[in-house]
Amino acid sequence: MEPQPEEPKEKPAEAEAGSGGVPIGTLVARVIRRNPKTFDALRYFVFLIIFTVVVFNAQGSAFDTSPYLTTANIRNKWETAFLNISSAEDWFDYMQSIFIPTTFPKYWYNGDAIDTSDLGWPGQLPESYRLLGSVRIRQLRVRNNTCGGVPSALSTYVPSCYGAYSQDKEETASFGRFGRYTYMSPGDAGGMSFQGQAGTYSAGGYVIGLPYLAANNTQDLAILVIKRLRDDKWIDHPTRAVFVEWNLFNPAQGTLIVCRLLAELPASGGVLPRMYLRVVRAEQLYPTSREVLNITLDAVLMALLIAYIYIELRLLMRLGLAAYFSTFWGVYDLVNFILFFVSFGARFTALTTAAALQFPPDGGSYVPYDNAAFYVVQWKNFMAINAVVTWTKMLKYLRHVPFMEYLIQVVFMALPDLLQFAGAALFLFVGFSLAHLLAYGDEIKTFQTMADAMMGIYREMLGDFNIDAMVNTNKVLGPALFIMWTLLATVLLLNMFVAIVVDSYGRVPPAPSPAGPPPR
């Protein structure tokens, strides 16, 4: 009998994918078969996509640079020169020679007079911003004898003393010739308290409105107002802050820009000038048909969020309160949900606040849109924090994937040691912050307060420092503190951190391959 030829043997699956490989379809099937919660991960990924679209809608779009270009342009026109003022006289010069001609232009660049259709477009024509309402100037003052630090022996040399601003020291009595400048309460002035560089200021004050007329003499009338304030010595010893506030609208982009120039005159002397801007889409305050679609998408996201809360509540009822919050992800979910509700609370507070404000305003009135814009900005701030929390939460749904589970175990293995290490590093961090505050705080802005000093030495760890300024300030401690801190931070602390993570990496058993055990 002739021997029958052998039938060809089937090639192993590894051969189909190359040497030692596994077909992609087989790998995915095995991962799904071994991890039944893969569907939960896919469902959460859809939630992430919707959340990301909502984030893009909050900003405008993922690729829209117009908010940045808007703020850069406005700062270039109004802030650049404002930052150079250092006295009350400089403030009046800036208002007369720069602010008013820029805000109320009356000539084209070729010398032609502006016609009626171009009035109310500040920023030197041609420009894209429409002035909404009037420009408001507001001053905050303090009462006499509010210092509390004058020795009795010097009382004859210092008969009057005006301390740092606080709302309990704020002056409300009329001043000027015949008491012409009267105080306006925060409720009547509108707006909200504002934090500057040297203090937090109330929404009230002594308010002056610049003329708003659709005529070419608006600039001249506004300059007359500033000249009268100068003649009356409107800014004097009790003055602690001067605000210049106005609103702009860009019809091409639909953006509302709340502008504020703040010149602070702290008790330490000098002037601290800065411009503050809030740029929001007008439809975020006064919805159009397109914004209604965005609000609908927000509602869909909230509905999905409520569904996830329901799932977690069922888990909490099954495990019990103590057991649920004893896990990391239980606490993490709670923080995530709170951030969602706070952010959407700010979102809808902005809508209700704006509904109470006149839009557009009368020509001669200033409307404090900053109140509503503030909540839009806070909505974006909380969404920014929650973007990190929400996307990182994907690890919760991927922790059943072997490699991801391995990484998470490494992190949790290192966590106790890292917390102890952070506690020990904190003592060094605070000690060197105090040392930098005392050694350089009087002369280097980076270390002027304890908070600034802590941020300053953190920046030193990353290589951002000005060693020349430190040496010039203190020739002994300057180089000594710098060398000691950089050696401890970069050589010792960072290497110890890496060592702890590497040690935990070695203590965790390696993750099994998702393709299964190798063939025998």
Image (spheres, grey):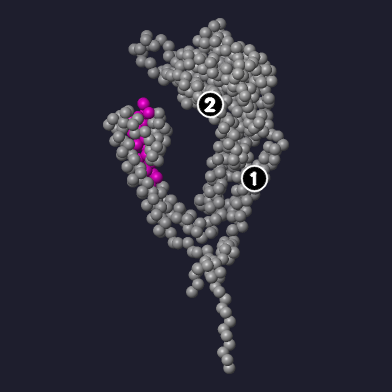
Which image quarter holds the N terminus?
Answer: bottom right
Mark in the foreground, 2 or 1: 2
Q: Alpha-carbon neighbours of circle 1 within 10 Å: few (<14), some, or many (≥20)?
A: some
Which residues, given as a range, are shown in magenta?
421-444
Residue tagged 1? 301
Residue tagged 2? 76
Expressed as whole percent of the image width and height from the top left, the position of residue 39 reads 61, 57
Q: Alpha-carbon neighbours of circle 2 within 10 Å: few (<14), some, or many (≥20)?
A: few
Between 373 and 225, the one lying in front of the other is: 225
Residue at point 60%, 12% (across, down):
220
Q: Residue lying at the far top in this picture: please name it.
A: 178
The answer, for residue 23, to whether it is visible in the render is yes
Residue at point 68%, 31% (across, down):
286
Residue at point 67%, 22% (across, down):
361
Mark 2 and mark 1: Cα distance apart in space: 39 Å
Mark 1 residue type: Leu
